[in-house]
Amino acid sequence: EEEKVGEEKPEVLSPEELEKLKEEVDERKKLISTLRGKPWPMRKKLLTLRESHEFVEKYEGALGKGKSRKLYAYKVMMLKKWMKFQRDFENFKTACVPWEMKIKEIESKYVSYLFLLYPCTVLLVLPGCLLFFNLAEKALMGRPYGSMPRKTVPRADEANAMDFAVLWDFGGYAQYSVLFYGYYNSQRAIGWLKFRMPLSYFLVGVGTVAYSYMVVIRTMARNANEDGGGDNNSFNFSWKMFTSWDYLIGNPETADNKFASITTSFKEAILEEQESRKDDNIHLTRFLRVLANFLVLCCLAGSGYLIYFVVRRSQKFALEGLESHSWWERNEVNMVMSLLGMFCPMLFDVISALENYHPRIALQWQLGRIFALFLGNLYTFIIALMDEINLKREEEEVLKLNMTIWEASLYNGTLGANSTAPPITVHPADIPRGPCWETMVGQEFVRLIVSDTMTTYITLLIGDFLRAVLVRFLNYCWCWDLEAGFPSYSEFDVSGNVLGLIFNQGMIWMGAFYAPCLPALNVLRLHVSMYLQCWAVMCCNVPQERVFKASGSNNFYMAMLLVILFLSTLPAIYTIVTIPPSFDCGPFSGKSRMFDVIQETLESDFPAWFGKVFSYASNPGLVLPFLLLMVLAIYYLQSTSKSYKQANLELKKKLQTVSRTINKVLTLIQYLLYSLCGTCTDIVCPPESTPCKGGEHRAHQGKSDHQIPPSATSPPAPRGHRIPGPLPGNQWQPAPSVQRVPNSQRH
Amino acid sequence: MLHDCTFFTRKEILQLHGRFHELAPHLVPLDYTNQPDIRLPLALIVSMPELKENPFRNRIVEVFSEDGQGNLSFNDFVDMFSALCETAPRELKTIYAFKIYDFNVDNFLCKEDLEKTLNRLTKGELTPEEVNLVCTKAMEEADLDGDSKLSFSDFENMISKAPDFLSTFHLRI
């Protein structure tokens, strides 16, 4: 048909032929775009590509006729430009993946790491948002430092505001900077752009949390989809055989470890299969497990109490004045929390030796316990913080009283109570300052994160690097083999590090509302961590001996991230909703509750009917039934999904039975045909010659059979001769595969 | 043209060419405009660091070579890395995985193929009875039509549910 069209002049084509030609061209274009996904040899792909390109170019121009020709040509050109743009954008995106070479190096030595990039994207977006309105504050309308009391260091502190010790504690100039909540102006509309500072602060804070939820849940949903959501136990041995080798491994050590772990995993699976596990002394095992859990609970309670005690002590120190105490006493809280975070997991590891679980289960218990430890510590810390907040608020009340007295003293009693007078200009540094509890909270979180970072780096340097150096050099003059025996090199613990990342993120979420630059600081910290860890991993660590993943998919860590997100936004939300903001610092100063800003905006910036609608919508009488409806919807969806899973399993069983039946029928037919052919050839061809039999065999190409000798008669088809499309396996397929369709369309 | 046929960008194809050239600098020309027909033997290709430790390296190279003996031209070389790269779709990887594990190239995974796969994976550490047990169990699990070998549709059905397949069956260059 192509040749026929080519010989005629384009204008002579009838509309149907034109339509057919257009279809053909479109089909070729589709072929070109899907060419990379076809399992053909490269030579064939290149040939097809060249032919299709030629065809498309030859007939594309001819297709547009008359008035529509110009439009068609224009459309084609735009499409080409769009595809080129897409391709360039893809190139650009791949060039932007940070640390690509580093990741490759590490992946070849350790297991795949890519899912760690997901939290990283969240981490990178957060500071973007927060940085935005931060910059807006400065650039658009910010009254600079020193113009307002909240932005100035009080006179009393000015002397040592620049001291390093004070700055390290985030006091002094650092306290009165964009870093913390207290700096921001509470004026409703600032500057010539009428930038709504308090509103934007509130919305950005809430928005980043909402965005984080969305990203985490979307990632979980995507992971769950990829899982196929099915029976995880029905293909145990097959999966072990075909998907356990990690093709990324390029390092001999890792390869050896992998071979060993695969062998072990097979042996374990075989043992379980043979059910020759001795059930000895299940009571002893149970008792030991209960004992282990009890010990762990004691540890957790102990650490919680320790933190509470230490925070109380630090409050006492603060009352007495920080200068009279040593460095340790001033930083006690953070150091204690970091040290607990370092040593308790090791303790849990030792205790779990009592339990005698399968390694994957033991890993999950371990991670759960570390999770509980961190959570307990964090919440104790927050409760102690709450006490401090209440203290500060009492202070504030006292100060407010003193303010009126101080103001009166300024006028020195020269005026009566009701008369007005020109305001006396006082330098902002001299105005007595309220204790800003929000800034204090922000400071505490920032200090916590800094000390956490320091602990991590120091652990890395001492625990990994120093240990490696000692093992390597002392080995020459030591009695036993240090490398194989006791200390040896430290293993790279993937799950521990991921947990650390997740908790770091949780702390950021908690503190971000009160210290807006915290996410930006965290990004810096992550960059440094990345380089430090990369170096440590390649030079001082060895791969884990038994590589066990905590779960089949990455959803385990995502689920933990989600829980942490929920638990860390709870305290922030609680403080926003219940505690009134300070009267003289921050964007919400003077309001009775922080979320009043929404009310104000609705009243002043939106038309009146909007406010009415909103007040109806937020009526509890409406909200409660809505919540009830959602709970019912969740229940309904849950039960339907269960029933679908059931139906799935039954269909699969049916599939097996049906395919076995059909196979038997086919075998029977083949046998009949063969015997028929056998009688024919006995008549037609002499019995010794084989070509007829060979011919028959080729006609029944692909059908599985037991009687006819397998492919010994026909040589394995080399790549160049293979037929495209589905592999010639069983001709009967449960569902028509996609590759068949173009074949039928062509004729 | 090559980057319409593969999942690589132009930059990556040039990088690949560099790697191909490194393998045999005296054989592979730097200038490919005349499309010379140079093939590198199997032994050279499997010495690459990405493939050196892989127990299936010989099969991988054989599957992507035109003559089935493992001699790769540059086009085949690019094709190999493209099919195993991260952005290749699951269906394509399943097809090639089937071909790789099919040692006797009869388009079925029969018991001998499974045994060979297992022995390569465990480096011969399992006893013959254990090998037999594992292969029997795997065959039972995946064989839908009861012919005691795995056709492509059986394999595909089994792999489509595997959670680890995409993350392990992937080469990065």
Image (tube, coloured by chain):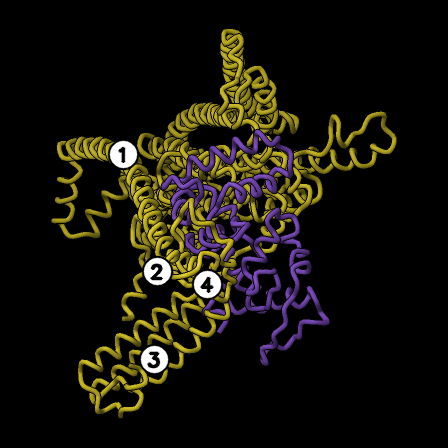
Residue underneath mark 1: A650
Q: Earlier in the sequence, mark 3 or mark 4?
A: 3
A711 to A496, vertically: above or below: below
Looking at the picture, does residue A133 appear above or below residue B30? above
The secondary element bearing badge 4 is classed as loop
Of all chains in the rendering, the one displayed in purple is: B
Q: CA distance from mark 1 to mark 3?
A: 52 Å
Q: What residue is rendered at 31% in x and 57% in y?
A: A194
Find residue A527 and report its horizontal and vertical position in percent: 57, 49
Disc 3 on helix, strand or loop?
helix
Amino acid beneath label 2: Gln
User: In the displayed structure, does residue A633 sit left or right of residue A293?
Assistant: left
Q: Which residue is mark 3?
A: A77
Indicate the colour of chain A.
Answer: yellow
Query: Mark 4 or mark 1, which is nearer to you?
Result: 4
Callout 4, which amino acid? Arg
Residue under label 4: A722
Residue A389, position as x, y percentages in the image: 42, 28
State whether residue A424 appears in this view: no
What is the chain letter for disc 4?
A: A
Q: Is tag 2's residue or tag 4's residue first in the polypeptide sequence?
A: 4
The amino acid pointed to by label 3 is Met
Crowd around label 1: few <14 · some 14–19 · many ≥20 (10 Å): few
Q: Nearer the viewer, mark 3 or mark 4?
A: 4
The residue singled out by tag 2 in the image is A739
* Disc 1, SS: helix
Q: Position of residue A487 (x, y in %)?
A: 73, 28
Circles 2 and 4 on the same subunit? yes
For mark 3, name the chain: A
- Who comes first in sequence, dot 3 or dot 2? 3
